Image (cartoon, rainbow, N blue to C red):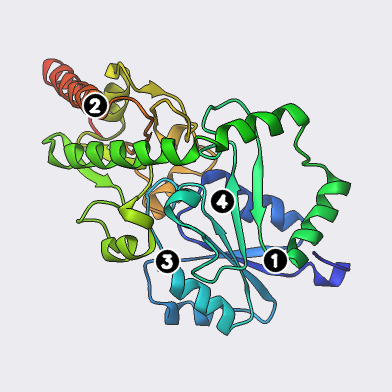
Amino acid sequence: MHQNADEFAYMLRAQRAAYGGTYELVHHQLRDLGISASMIDIAAAADSWRPLLQPNTKVIYVEAISNPLMEVPDLPAVAAFAKQHGLTSVIDATFATPINLQPALDPGFDVVIHSATKFLNGHSDLIAGVVASSAEIVSQIKSKANHLGGSLDPHAAFLLHRGVKTLALRVERQNANAALLAEALEKHPQVAAVFYPGLPSAPRYELVRELFINGGAGGMLAFEPYGGMHAAEAVLKHLKLGMVAPSLGGVETLATRPSSTTHVGLTREQRQAIGIGEGLIRVAVGIENGQDLVDDFMQALDAAAAAAAAAPTNKVE
């Protein structure tokens, strides 16, 4: 989208907590291209973002549901701020899916992106991405993709077409399972915090109910057990139905510690600064029987607590 070298001073705006790969892209790879970036706190009022604008600021980027803390920005406010200041607004709606936030262009964003590898495909067997925007912007992106790569191979396209056919059914089940699991985790005595936008205790819960269709708050959640990293590792070790892996959006339930996987590229201090504790567990909820999932996580928490009680000399962070 840049025409000459002197235009490579564009600013990219990004929310404070985002996917680790996005964080590294924004703060490292894009800087090699002369594109600098600043982070904004999506929990703050839009007025507080204005002083951070530079004459060459061009883009504001947000995740519809942030990874891994499941924060939902005031999406209409972000889109309105972008329009007011002549910025291109980009939203990553991967966690929300087009089923829950449909269409994502409604809040007023210029560009909607999805990691099609995840929910759109739903079977954890391909790598793909989707960009939805105006014909003008899509034309520019197609031109760049044609020259720089990134084209989907025929078999992957076939698999993605297969996956999209069951998207609505899968997401409906994942919504229900995630809500059930989040509610159970919130009540468990070994859990310090639960991050799920569909909980009444979540920030902007009323906004989520307003923006997301039929109350569907997605199939992603996170929680922190008491005891930090060692407790989290013990919980993961004792899972039987849920698998320990960093991906998401498939039919199976996956759990991981972001500090050792998705956000391992950040320093511990950087993770702490954006609210990602060493004991945080992110869960990508699948389509299994919901009560079976709840039972599995409850027994894993109980087993981890019992193991800790039996070994009092273990360090607890």
At 43% from the left and 82% from the top, the residue drawn is 47
The residue that mark 3 highlights is 42
First in sequence: mark 2 vs mark 3: 3
First in sequence: mark 2 vs mark 1: 1
Residue type pointed to by label 4: Tyr
* C-alpha separation, residue under disc 1 versus residue under disc 3: 25 Å
**Few, some or many residues within 10 Å of mark 3 (<14, 14–19, 20+):** many
Q: Quick one: SS at disc 3?
A: loop
Give coordinates of residue 150: x percent, y percent.
77, 41
First in sequence: mark 1 vs mark 4: 4
Q: Which mark is residue 297?
A: 2
For the residues bearing labels 2 and 4, Cβ distance under 8 angstroms: no
**The one of 211 and 4 positioned closer to us in this rendering:** 211
The residue that mark 4 highlights is 23
Q: Which mark is residue 134?
A: 1
Nearer mark to the viewer, of 2 and 3: 2
Q: Quadrant of the N terminus?
A: bottom right
Question: In the rendered image of this protein, does residue 8 appear above or below residue 18?
Answer: below
Nearer mark to the viewer, of 4 and 3: 3
Nearer mark to the viewer, of 1 and 4: 1
**The one of 196 and 174 positioned closer to us in this rendering:** 174
* C-alpha separation, residue under disc 2 versus residue under disc 3: 31 Å
At 37% from the left and 29% from the top, the residue drawn is 287
Q: Would residue 201 appear left or right of 248 to someone viewing this image?
A: left
Q: Which mark is residue 245?
A: none
Residue type pointed to by label 3: Ile
Q: Would residue 137 appear left or right of 121 to someone viewing this image?
A: right
Question: In the rendered image of this protein, does residue 130 appear above or below residue 56?
Answer: above
For the residues bearing labels 2 and 3, Cβ distance under 8 angstroms: no
* C-alpha separation, residue under disc 1 versus residue under disc 4: 26 Å
Q: Quick one: SS at disc 2?
A: helix
Residue type pointed to by label 1: Ser
